[in-house]
Amino acid sequence: HEKTGLIIDAYFSATKVRWILDHVEGAQERAEKGELLFGTIDTWLVWKLTDGAAHVTDYSNAARTMLYNIKELKWDDEILEILNIPKAMLPEVRSNSEIYGKTAPFHFYGGEVPISGMAGDQQAALFGQLAFEPGMVKNTYGTGSFIIMNTGEEMQLSENNLLTTIGYGINGKVYYALEGSIFIAGSAIQWLRDGLRMVENSPESEKYALNSHNNDEVYVVPAFTGLGAPYWNQNARGSVFGLTRGTTKEDFIKATLQSIAYQVRDIIDTMQVDAQTAIQVLKVDGGAAMNNFLMQFQADILGIDIARAKNLETTALGAAFLAGLSVGYWKNLDELKLLNETGELFEPSMNESRKEQLYKGWKKAVKATQVFAEIDD
């Protein structure tokens, strides 16, 4: 954790690489000779685009492998030795905004296009949200939900099960971040549509939630693949609490949407403790951020403003910003800041006692879910 900022988990690359080297005949020998190479998806894309001329990755993706020392900015020899992973198979780690190579001529009608920006999905979204200052936070509501706080040039290790990672490296400087991952967010709405067939399409969930007239006593804990940060309980499974004879489809859909917001609060509360700073506004993007009910409830349960991006595709925007900076399309970060556009601001309207009462119920539901998931002796 002190070296990589991560928690030991098969979610990251290291143990998967070891598995391949153990189970694919001849893999270990070929890796030691540099004939078998490793990389994350960015590495593979650049390798293919350059026709094998560049075997590279960037800070943000390297930080996800559980092999990279994010403090010393190098592949960690001790971890590599423990896992017996040959350094010869690892890509060169570069900044997030520079020329990595040019596309092979056969890709684009004989032209050679410079490849000039590279970043992990969520880190690109952080950059696309123009969250350049320490303390700025963004959340992407995709299939899962990913909350990242810029902590500046200081590496802050979480004491509460969040991840410490590299946000981005640019102009010779590296900027760190705290991250909390939620496994089930927008996919909970997909579950309502495809699994339970309660809605015909995702936007319809907003209409049903607004037509619910219960007292928010139903709690859905969508731990379909376990619980992510800050619980990290892989044995937990989905559960529902508070059902009565009067519970309606509208109530169930509303509770499912609220579960996304509750999980975000779990992480935001933890993040504020780790960073020792109060978050004033949460920048949001991603498909589920289009749901106005969810965004308003998110503002209410957090008690802070929610700033929805005008362009919700901030990952693509961040990648474009990084690429444009390295080729001079934009001169610097100050020029990018002028492009900032907030689509809509959601302000909290729920009183403090009601907010805490609802959240207390959520914590009780999560606790019960984890008790049910305990493995019998």
Image (tube, rainbow, N blue to C red):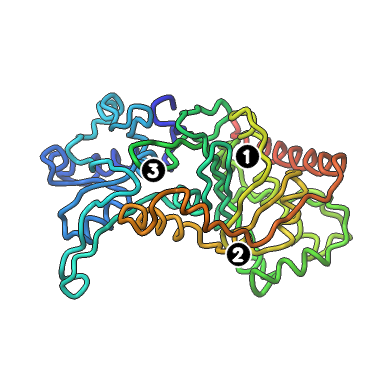
Q: Residues within 10 Å of mark 3 (few under 14, many from 20)?
A: many
User: On the rendered structure, is 128 left or right of 84?
Assistant: right
Residue at point 55% right, 31% down?
Answer: 161
SS at badge 1: helix
**Residue 71 placed where, x, y %?**
38, 28
**Residue 256 visible to the viewer:** no
Q: Quadrant of residue 11?
A: top left
User: On the rendered structure, is 72 left or right of 349?
Assistant: left
**Residue 175 placed where, x, y %?**
44, 37
Residue 66's disc number: none
Q: Which residue is mark 1?
A: 267
Residue type at the position of mark 3: Ser
Residue at point 50% right, 27% down?
Answer: 157
Q: Which residue is mark 2?
A: 190
Q: Quadrant of residue 66?
A: top left
User: On the rendered structure, is 348 left or right of 178?
Assistant: right
Disc on the earlier residue, 3 or 2: 3
Residue at point 20% right, 70% down?
Answer: 107
Against 53, residue 22 (above or below) is above
Q: Nearer the viewer, mark 3 or mark 2?
A: 3
The one nearer the camera, 288 or 11, is: 288
